[in-house]
Amino acid sequence: MEIYSKFYLFLLSKRINKQLPYLSLEDIVKIKLLKEDVEKLFFNPKGIHGVDHTVRVMILIAMISNLLRVSDVEKCLLLHAGAIHDIGREKDGICLVHGEKSFQKAMKYKVLNNMTLNENMIIKKIVESHCKSDKEANFVDTNLLVLYKIFKDADGLDRVRLGDLDRSYLRFECSHRLINVAKYLLNNDVNELLNQDLKKLYKLEVY
């Protein structure tokens, strides 16, 4: 059975309050394009903060965003934040400044050229804050805080790769229900999933 079919059947078994976590065709295309934009910018592309981690985070961002019904524009901003959030790392392990370096690197390599100044400021705030505590992040804008929490949950869910996911840190109920999805993504080749014939990756309906 092809990977996209297995993933479809897996998601069918993970309905959340009668909603199905899904990726639209637009999500898949955007994630693939962003992956291509950043895959050469990591200090260790195959490491624990490399390309595969970034792709999984983007997939989880899209799923949480779809479940929470955020706007397409907001989801696009989050996907860009997901694409660049670790490109500024120079080592694995705790680093409280790699968010700032990641945004600077994204600007240097023109990853965010299609964004407006205001959109870049939103991405900047999320990326620079993602490696800090919620208190240190200090979000005043309520809507921006929601986007930050979506990002943090998606990034946090991929801690399954490290074996230290603490579900008490997840901020949304739907994120708790995506833990098995995060494990599925870890245990399957997400790049192969993205490289399937896009015509076969139908948008999954919300039940």
Image: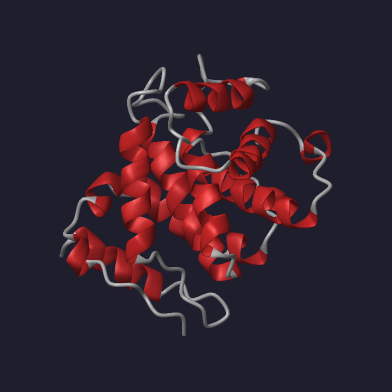
List x then y, in percent, for residue 40.
33, 24
Tally of numbered tags = 0
Q: Residue at x 54, y 49 (%)?
A: 77
Q: According to the image, what is the colour scheme of the structure?
A: secondary structure
Residue 128: x %, y % from top left: 66, 31
Name the residue located 52 percent from the left edge and 20 percent from the top edge: 89
The answer to whether 8 appears left or right of 160 in the picture is left
Is there any visible trace of residue 128 in the rendered image? yes
In what quadrant of the picture does the N terminus appear? bottom left
The answer to whether 145 is drawn above or below residue 17 in the figure is above
Q: Residue furthest top?
A: 90
Give the residue at x 60% y 40%.
Answer: 123
Question: Is residue 28 toward the left or the right of residue 152 in the image?
Answer: left
Near-viewer residue (114 or 126) = 114
Furthest residue toward front:
116
74 over 22 or under it: above or below: above
Q: Residue at x 61, y 27 (%)?
A: 99
Q: Viewer-proximal residue, 5 or 150?
A: 150
Does the rendering let one see residue 87? no
Q: Left or right of 123: which side holds 55?
A: left
Q: Position of residue 24 (x, y in %)?
A: 37, 66
9 in relation to 139, above or below: below
Residue 96 percent location from the top left of the image:
68, 22
